[in-house]
Image (tube, rainbow, N blue to C red):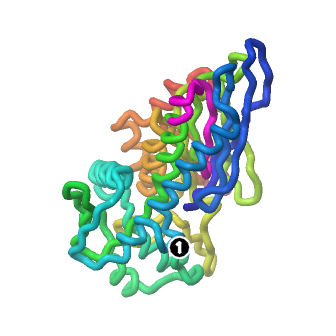
Amino acid sequence: MVRAIGLLLSASLLLAGCGERLEQFGGPTMGSSYSVKYVRGASGPSVERARGEVEGILAEIDRQMSTYRADSDVERFNALPSGSCVALPAPMLELVAFAGELSKDSDGAFDMTLEPLLNLWGFGPQSRGDQVPSAEAIAEVRARVGQHHLRIEGGELCKDAAVQLDFNAIAAGYAVDRVVARLGELGVSSALVEITGELKAVGHKPDGSPWHIAIEAPRDDRQVAQKIIRLEGLGVSTSGDYRNYFERSGQRYSHTLDPKTGSPIRHNLAAVTVVDESALRADGLSTLLMALGPEAGEAFAERHGIAAFFVIREGQGFVSHGSERFRELFEQEEK
């Protein structure tokens, strides 16, 4: 599960009185990495305890949702033929239902059954390298793609076509929410959690100041902060086409696919950042808006009250602006 990191952490390691201090740890996960910073009081969990709890959650999600291991629950489902049903863990069914709502709301712009197409274009876990497939090959694979082929019956997930699930567009955001919630149960009220680029902040730093993060400018060569925003109880996700792509004959092919065509997006939206109380929702919506493109994406964000920040290619440069809800949340940063 790999996502391009579009957010730069800017929390400083400050010490404060009242016995509070900032602890931090991290490591590899989902083909990328994670990091946790949390304010530990006198009764807070040790780093060892917090790390164990966090890595337990990440290991569970990997066993359930990783398309890079043959023994995962999702790969067990993906190997089944059309007409099959299989019992799956409750979190997976919840995420499928959530994805179904996103797909319905966006007229299919969000789709978690695109793995065969991603593999065909060279972006998936079973791909054989970057390639531009023929129209016939795309049409053949599209017959096995579509969120509408899935249905939940009791504790089972069923499919009426040989579809394959890919949780990459929402698994990291879900993991962030799970980790933040578990830290809260352990007595942590202030933390900054980042998993493969998706993140959420709660509470404040030890000196009482809020957490700040930087939205990354769409650069291929290095990470550059474009905009600093303050986070208090909010999750953030960025999707973009500026890291994972290939070029053929002067044409740029993004890893973000348009479910309606089965091909990479062709619009000029370079990146979109979504801020929401739920990191899961931010994760899914950033993918959805990226697939829709600048005009349809901005209209969707305004219609649904989504806090989104769009970066659009214009000539040799970029223009950027936030949705009405984004401007409301970060009015002070806009000034």
- 111 relative to 330 in the view: left or right: left
Q: Quadrant of the C terminus?
A: top right
Q: Nearer the viewer, residue 331 or 255?
A: 255
| 310, 99: nearer the viewer | 99
Check residue 298 for magenta coloring: no
Q: Is residue 21 visible?
A: yes
Place of residue 99 in the rendered image (x, y in percent of width and height, measured from the top left): 35, 53
- Tell me the magenta residue range: 182-197
Left or right? Give the position of 31 relative to 181: right
The residue shown at (37%, 55%) is 92
Where does the image place residue 134, in percent across and percent down from the top left?
44, 86
Name above or below for residue 306 compared with residue 60: above
- Residue under the point 25% across and 60% down: 156
Pick the residue in front: 133 or 13. 13
Q: Is residue 319 above or below residue 61?
A: above
In the visual, does 284 lie left or right of 149?
Answer: right
Disc 1 marks a residue whose amino acid type is Pro
Drawn side of residue 86 relative to residue 121, left or right: left
At label 1, counting other C-alpha atoms closer than 10 Å, the crowd grade (few under 14, some 14-19, many 20 or more) is: some
Mark 1 residue element = loop
188 drawn magenta: yes
Q: Position of residue 69 (x, y in %)?
A: 52, 71
Residue 312: horizontal and vertical position, in percent?
56, 50
Count of marks overlaid on the render: 1
Residue 265 in sight here: no
Q: Residue at x 62, y 56 (%)?
A: 29
Residue at 42% x, 52% y is 288
Q: Quadrant of the N terminus?
A: bottom right
Residue denoted by label 1: 125
